[in-house]
Amino acid sequence: MAEETLMEMESVQDLIGSAGLAAKIVPGPNDEYYLTVGEPAFDPLVTTLASRKCVLIGLFCTEGFSPDARFSLLYVFEKKNIVLILVRNSDGTATSVARIFPSASWFERECRDGFGIRFDGAFDERRLFLHETYPDGFHPLRKDVRNIPVTMRSTIDVVGEYPFRSVSGNGVYQVAVGPVHAGIIEPGHFRFSVIGEKIFNLEIRMFYKHRGIEKLAEGKTPQEVVRIAEAVSGDESVANATACCRAVEAIAQMTVPERAHYLRTILLELERIGSHLGDQGGMLVDVGFPLGASQFAVLREEVFRMNASLTGSRFLRGMVDVGGLSRDIPKRQLDELGEFIRELKNRYRIGLKIVLSTSSVLDRFSPTGVIRRSLLRPLNITGPMARASGGRVDVRINHPYGLYDRYPPTMKTLNDGDVLSRFTVKASEFLDSLDLIERLLADIPEGGVRTIPEIKDGYALSLVESPRGQDLCWVWIRNGTIERYKVRTASFCNWQAIEHAVQGEIVPDFPLINKSLNLSYAGTDL
């Protein structure tokens, strides 16, 4: 065992604070650690992890993982560079941890819908992704679901309707927005409680178009699941494909060619700049500043055209594959990318200067939509929105993968947590990504771009930093095919921040706040 791994093991043992439990820690293939915990020790250990300021970044269920129980619940905790996974076996019930780790609420509701797990003591037992039309007793992620006939409800009576939080008082009005919206965005329901225009409560409801992605992955080959991963969220195709590949490659202890690492990183950063341009242009549209919005829109379109030139896909699909890349990008095209990046940097700075010197824009951006730093750890809020509120979490730095240990990005943080801070952080990250791409292009080596994969059985966790924040992926391969593919995008956790960001604001500022967070509907509703 390498010296670095020994040091990490000692840190994990210190974290759980129990010599008896520490002996059961099993290192995973991707720098994660597994610890199977019995019921008597589980609650005290979770309380200990909370006192040590760990963050619950994931919780999911699987069947057949342990020979001692039908269900296994995997709780993924993070503290700085340590990832600890508690394995909790269950017969279908478990105590809730949502009062200790609020981020667990949606996770537990997801496990309840998908597998029928009952969490005793949960403060929210409503359905999550199974809306009212799904019949009782239907749990689509169970292995036996294909043998159960499903008859959807055609009508819902008042008693069966989703119980939104009840808010009442003198002058209180409910303003319902969605789930169907103007334009082509996906469905989501926003229920505001307002007095006049001021918002004092917002409740969101997602999951109107659940796609069954995790179930679809079962029985597929790892290569087939990479293509499914690309469809999790359209503008995070590279991030989610990379996360999936990293897990499969770690299980097989596969060496990815050096040139492939360079190209993967370039594609990841191209995806980031396209996403950030869309966010910033959208914010400017929502404050009625077409001069700035049009400039960012033009630049984003040109980035997408460059993506298509390099890979054949505006969203960079079909490139990342198990073992590296599906094909190389020739030097001529990389040289064209370098020229494009240099020009893009100059044009972006001109547009950015115009925006940040326009007082009417700054007045709308600040101090609108504040996310307090105290919410980051309890809700596992990550990405630019967290870094704009003083958070210092970036997977590329905290858990470097690929080339990010050699080419670490600069972490830009601000403390105000408002729309202006989020706009500014994304601007800094955009420029940093351009610099990083230029460095990678200057240093990229020759050679192959793919190792022929030898698929092996096992399981591994993978974290990546998508444009929106921390994406999590867990892959379990059995008999050469996918037994369980769990994916959790940053949006799944980040959506819950919007309910806090709008409090005290006025209804007309909601679109601006929403756009500044850039939350993915598809990336949440899997």
Image (cartoon, helix red, strand yellow):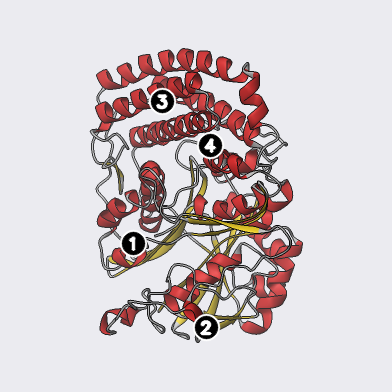
Q: In this view, does 217 lie to the left or right of 109?
A: left
Which residue is disc 1 drawn over?
211
Q: Name the residue under label 4.
A: 405
Name the N-terminal-most of marks 3 and 4.
Answer: 3
Q: Which amino acid does label 3 sit on?
A: Ala
| Sooner in the amino-acid sequence: mark 4 or mark 1 | 1
Against 221, is 390 above or below? Answer: above
Which one is in front, 83 or 496? Answer: 496
Q: Is mark 2 on a helix, strand or loop?
A: strand
Q: Position of residue 255 (x, y in %)?
A: 36, 46
Disc 1 + disc 3, Cβ < 8 Å? no
Let me know if residue 299 appears in the view.
yes
Does label 2 or label 1 sit earlier along the sequence? Answer: 2
Q: Disc 4 to disc 1, how far (Cα)?
A: 35 Å
Q: Answer few, some or many: residues within 10 Å of disc 2's Cα (few below 14, many 20 plus, some between 14 and 19).
A: many
Task: Residue 33 in the image: state x and y as whole percent.
Answer: 56, 62
Instruction: Identify the amino acid type marked 1.
Output: Arg
Earlier-in-chain disc, 2 versus 4: 2
Please tell me whether mark 2 or mark 3 is closer to you in this view. 3
Q: In which quarter of the image is the C terminus?
A: bottom left
Q: How far apart are marks 2 and 4 (CA)?
A: 38 Å
For the residues labelled 4 and 1, say whether their Cβ atoms are less than 8 Å apart.
no
Task: Give the label, 1 or 3, closer to the camera.
Answer: 3
User: Which residue is tagged 2?
Assistant: 90
Q: Disc 2 residue type?
A: Ser
Q: What element carries label 1?
A: loop
- 3D distance between C-alphas at marks 1 and 3: 30 Å
| Kind of residue at disc 4 | Asp
The residue at which mark 3 appears reads as 297
Which residue is depicted at the point 35% across and 43% down? 256
513 versus 3 height, above or below: above
Q: How crowded is mark 1: few (under 14 residues within 10 Å), some or many (20 or more)?
A: some
